[in-house]
Amino acid sequence: LEALVNFLLLLGAPGGHEDAALRQLQAAALRWNSCSQQAVSTDLAAQSCEAVVAALRRLSSQTSDGSGSVELPWSSRCAAHACAFLALASTVQAFEEVRDALVPGQTVTITGLQSAAGERLNGAQGVMQRFHAESGRYIVRLNPEDPPSEWKKVRPQNLVPSLDPSTAQAMALEGARECGRACLEAVADVFDDLLVEMHEEGGEEAWTMFLHAQLSTAMWEALVRCLGGGALQLGGAALLDLCGQDVTVCSLLARNMFSAHLATQVLPMPREIQVQAVKRILGLQESFARAYCGLY
């Protein structure tokens, strides 16, 4: 998150939504630093998800259009997007570690809202519909007859779920996976655009191949983490669909994935960290290989 903050500062955001993305990242990074010794909460995971999705949107929309923004070179954009996808993977992992993640269909009670409109909702019961990654809120339907336009977006800390202790842990895990899928849906178009851009920016230069390998690995890690158990069933057809039905793009992604481990032999790092990095990359390569071999 702190690395992403630095990238957004480089962009020189002129205001509006761009400044909002930067503020969200800074707030999330500060909270992570302050809670390093505490259990991760659902509201922190949700806030982080909102911040990372906003940052990915900011990075993907940045242009040199005379508005004051600075267009980062492709190498910097690769590194920034890799940081963003790694942060997204960690955010979804945080959802898996909490014990109070909500699941669709769960009954919740709204509490603690302080605005004039919000105070009228305090004490109201509703049914959670889904997690909205772009806002870091849960969508709640208060009445069965309410149309979607009247559903409320409420932050996790303002929702008290009704829990059955015997099923709480299983429900929390399912809730985490639902949040992961929502995160993936929120950045699916960014994912697709980056695959195409890597294809267009492709080259045989060692530095470019290194950057593409790191970005591809980060994107795949976010995908695997967001899909949770569903990643184990990701087959060749799904992988090809992920690559826009373009076999060339799929092959390029495979080349990037299967060369990612070479970075651990080039970059200076302590032995213990190098071993952890190799294990992480080999695990990601294994999951990708299962899907890639399904094409043949």
Image (cartoon, rainbow, N blue to C red):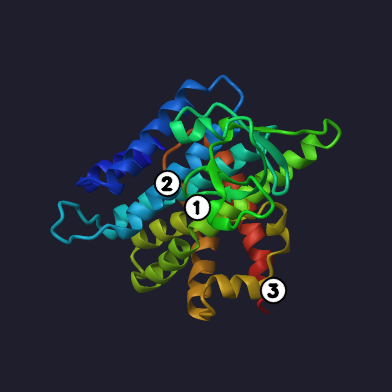
Q: Are marks 1 and 3 in contact (CB under 8 Å)?
A: no
Amino acid type, residue under disc 3 in the picture: Gly
**In the rendered image, which residue does mark 1 sit on?**
218
- What amino acid is found at the position of numbered circle 1 in the picture? Ala
Check disc 1: other Cα within 10 Å, few if <14, some if 14-19, many if 20+.
many
**Do residues under tags 1 and 2 come within 8 Å of each other at their CB atoms?**
yes
Say which label, 1 or 2, has the lower sequence index: 2
**Label 3 vs label 2: CA separation?**
29 Å
Q: Mark 1 to mark 3: distance in Å?
A: 21 Å
Nearer mark to the viewer, of 3 and 2: 2
For image coordinates 65% across by 55% down, the residue present is 227
In this rendering, the answer to whether 95 lies above or below 55 is: above
Labelled disc at residue 83 = 2
> Dot 2 surroundings within 10 Å: few (below 14), some, or many (20 or more)?
many
- Quarter of the image for the N terminus: give it: top left
Question: What residue is shown with label 3?
Answer: 294
- Which label is found at residue 237? none
**Helix, strand or loop at mark 3:** loop
* Direction from residue 14 to residue 47 in the image, left or right: right
